[in-house]
Image: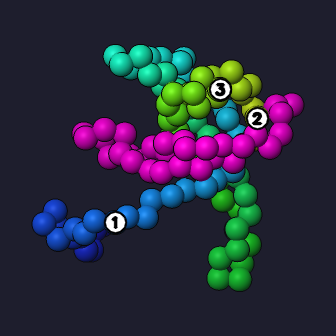
Amino acid sequence: MITERVGDTGTQTIVDNALRITGCLYERDALRMTPARIPVLSFKLRHQSVQRELEVERNVSCELSVMAMGPLAQQLAATPLGVLMVVEGFLTARSLKNQNPVLHVQKYELLAQAQ
């Protein structure tokens, strides 16, 4: 049940949009090219950790849709599934019609190879 919502005319521009998360590369689409010949790769990152909230430890997990473009897409297309990595980037809507968030990679670091 929605109790409050800001209308389209009442929204403000937000300039901070940064996400850094550790997760496992567990699903990947085939590398594709845009009409401008820019490589694009969509993949899923699975995160699991223990976080502290109100002085209580909580097991948290989520799956994120992630997109990489250009050289990052080519590098990640060759990365084995199951690898643990830190991904940094920004969130945006999947499309104009689908407002579900997608993390766009700006940089990443591999932490451990797949077992």
Q: Which mark is drawn over residue 83?
A: 2
| Residue 44 visible in image | yes
Residue type at mark 3? Gln
Cα–Cα gap, marks 3 and 2: 13 Å
Q: Is disc 3 placed on a helix, strand or loop?
A: helix
Q: Which mark is drawn over residue 106?
A: none
112 in magenta: yes
> Which residue is drawn at the image coordinates 83% and 39% (left, top)?
112
105 in magenta: yes
The spot of residue 42 in percent (x, y) is 51, 29
Q: Is disc 1 placed on a helix, strand or loop?
A: loop
Cα–Cα gap, marks 1 and 3: 31 Å
The spot of residue 83 in percent (x, y) is 76, 35
Mark 3 in CB contact with mark 2 (< 8 angstroms): no
Q: Which mark is drawn over residue 14?
A: 1
The spot of residue 41 in percent (x, y) is 52, 26
Determine whether, in the image, residue 8 is placed left or right of residue 73. Answer: left
- The residue labelled by disc 3 is 75
Boundaries of the magenta span: 86-115
- Magenta stretch, main secondary structure, is strand
> Which residue is drawn at the image coordinates 49% and 42% (left, top)?
104
